[in-house]
Image (cartoon, rainbow, N blue to C red):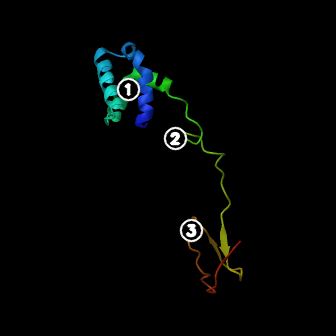
Amino acid sequence: MDDDTLLELAVALEPEIAQLTDRVTADRFTALLAALRAGELVGDDLFELLTADAALRDRVNALLPPEKDGEKGYQELPGKGEIIAPLFYACPEGDYRHPVQEIGEPVPDCPAHRIALVAE
């Protein structure tokens, strides 16, 4: 989470921080928020504070906008995984076949005739 998003989140959380956590954590939150507003690099500390306590973490998750397709976060893989047919290269003379094991693998020449194999 970048500092701008964290600042927006913290500002939204500020009015209810005293009800969500203890006094020490609320005071630490207020100090870190002031430092973040002043441009200090305390985003990591504020993020850690907000995610360390279960009640704060739940409230932060509720305030975050849902992630859109194409942005960071979990997304299901497209479609179902399917087995594809193997690819073979064969000797033009018809007496040798070579299976391709992975993409980019070099295709050897026919060991018997020393000629290039062709895709089937």
Name the residue nearer the viewer: 57 or 10. 10
- The alpha-carbon separation of the residues under discs 2 and 3 comes to 30 Å
Q: Residue at x 41, y 30 (%)?
A: 7
Ranked by sequence position, the earlier of labels 3 and 1 is 1
Secondary structure beneath disc 3?
loop
Identify residue type, mark 3: Gly
Query: Helix, strand or loop at disc 1?
Result: helix
Residue matched to label 2:
72
Mark 1 lies on residue: 50
User: x, y percentage for residue 63?
Assistant: 49, 24
* Residue closest to the far top: 19
In what quadrant of the picture does the N terminus appear? top left
Query: As drawn, which residue projects farthest toward the front?
Result: 38
Q: Amino acid at mark 2?
A: Lys
Q: Are marks 2 and 3 in contact (CB under 8 Å)?
A: no
Which of labels 3 and 1 is toward the front?
1
Residue in front for this viewpoint, 98 or 41: 41
**Mark 2 vs 3, N-terminal side:** 2
For marks 1 and 2, the one nearer the N-term is 1
Q: Residue at x 39, y 12 (%)?
A: 19
